[in-house]
Image (cartoon, grey):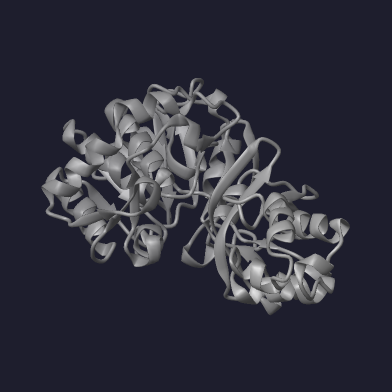
């Protein structure tokens, strides 16, 4: 039968292509399908078009899941070093940015071309614009139906991604298949996403739109110190995107606009030693001038520091070192880099990525309840989970 394969993989993104390569290496006949005309769009647009393809500091602690230990096995089986070796094999130049993030020197299309080349070498058959109308299981066969054509396989891999960035094709397909097979799904929500505000804070963000600075953002005992960006909708930048993965509707977050300095102590010392120094001039030593001026203007802080009461100095300290805000929401899946939640890891073997109660059915990548921090971790999860599934399909 011409439509019979050992492995069918639905979703030709990072995880799906990696799984196809590994399955093909084992001599399996592999069909890799995707509903889009252009495959791996998330790779293409990532990292500003340079693809932040992994992080040399990858650790299970960089991932969010109801089972924090679930990612350990896959990450151990296929490490950042393993993917770097593949990059080197294809002579793709790369560089390290901050915090262990690795980017291509040139266009991210090189990563896509590399994966397609690897697929071609092991005879993976790729079908684009392939819309899956239905998935069935009859005896030991998984049947994928497309336009009345039936494709059969012993192993079916769902690598269809999450809900983030629908404009490049994200859908809820993977969750529907999981539900069809009675798998539990951890509630999904946008992650690595800008946060939005209303009223006074939104007005402030509008005034400061485009301004960025290093800030520490915390919620409970979780904190990130990276860049923060004011936008006309609210707050963005790496530190905000990071905390958004932990944020839930109604939660407040704490923002330290000057995390390396204790403004309370500094202002008191300045009042004692340099009483004639202007308060705006002092704050400009620690903050961007536009931000310092707006803080002083809105709170009517003016004149020499000697003229400000202890209450005023404490207020300045709280605004800068401990600014509590409650987001109205987030920009949603439209701009979210990933989807938090997904197929419950209790349903899946961490060693093989195969469903415990459905032999031959695998879920890999973003569709699973494993969400990485910003900085290449989600791609590493795609490579690792795809590699692992490819060993057992």
> Does residue 84 show up?
yes
In the image, residue 69 above or below residue 254: above
Q: Nearer the viewer, residue 193 or 102?
A: 102
> Which quadrant does the C terminus fall into?
top left
Mark yes or no: residue 192 visible: no
Residue shown at the point (61%, 48%) measured from the top left: 243
Residue 382 is situated, as x and y percent measured from the top left of the image, at: 38, 42
**Quarter of the image where the N terminus is located:** top left
- Residue 358, how many percent across, how many down? 48, 24
Identify the residue at horizontal 30%, vertical 39% (top origin). 19
Left or right: residue 225 versus residue 15 is right
The quadrant in which residue 325 appears is bottom right
Looking at the image, which residue is at 33% across and 26% down? 76
In this figure, what is the number of numbered marks? 0
Residue 182 to residue 212: above or below: above
Which is more toward the observer, 392 or 210?
210
Q: Where is residue 390? Give x, y as percent.
A: 29, 33
Who's the residue at 74% across and 54% down the image?
Answer: 268
């Amino acid at each position: 039968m011409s439509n019979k394969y050992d492995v069918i993989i639905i979703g030709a993104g990072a995880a799906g292509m990696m799984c196809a390569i590994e399955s093909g290496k084992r001599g399996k006949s592999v069909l890799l399908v995707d509903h889009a005309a252009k495959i791996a769009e998330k790779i293409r647009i990532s990292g500003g078009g340079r693809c932040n393809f992994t992080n040399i500091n990858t650790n299970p602690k960089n991932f969010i899941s109801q089972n924090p230990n679930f990612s350990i096995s896959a990450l151990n089986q296929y490490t950042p070093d393993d993917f770097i070796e593949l990059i080197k094999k294809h002579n793709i130049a790369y560089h390290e940015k901050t915090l262990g993030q690795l980017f291509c020197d040139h266009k991210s299309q090189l990563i896509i071309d590399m994966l397609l080349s690897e697929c071609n070498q092991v005879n993976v058959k790729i079908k684009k614009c392939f819309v899956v109308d239905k998935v069935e299981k009859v005896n030991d066969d998984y049947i994928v139906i497309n336009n009345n054509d039936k494709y059969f396989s012993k192993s079916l891999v769902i690598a269809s991604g999450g809900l983030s960035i629908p404009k490049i094709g994200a859908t809820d397909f993977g969750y529907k298949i999981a539900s069809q097979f009675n798998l539990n799904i951890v509630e999904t929500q946008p992650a690595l996403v800008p946060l939005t505000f209303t009223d006074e804070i939104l007005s402030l963000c509008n005034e400061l739109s485009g301004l960025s600075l290093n800030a520490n953002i915390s919620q409970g005992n979780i904190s990130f110190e990276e860049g923060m960006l004011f936008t006309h909708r609210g707050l963005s930048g790496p530190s905000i995107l990071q905390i958004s993965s932990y944020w839930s509707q109604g939660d407040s977050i704490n923002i330290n606009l000057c995390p390396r300095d204790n403004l309370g102590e500094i202002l008191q010392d300045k009042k004692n030693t340099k009483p004639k120094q202007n308060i705006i001039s002092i704050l400009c030593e620690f903050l961007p001038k536009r931000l310092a001026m707006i803080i002083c203007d809105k709170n009517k802080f003016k004149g020499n520091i000697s003229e400000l009461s202890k209450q005023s100095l404490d207020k300045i300290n709280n605004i800068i070192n401990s600014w509590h805000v409650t987001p109205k929401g987030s920009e949603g899946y439209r701009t979210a880099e990933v989807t938090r939640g997904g197929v419950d890891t209790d349903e899946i073997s961490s060693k093989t990525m195969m469903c415990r109660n459905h032999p031959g059915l695998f879920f890999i990548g973003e569709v699973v309840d494993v969400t990485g921090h910003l900085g290449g971790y989600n791609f590493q999860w795609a490579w690792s989970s795809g590699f692992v599934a490819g060993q057992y399909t």
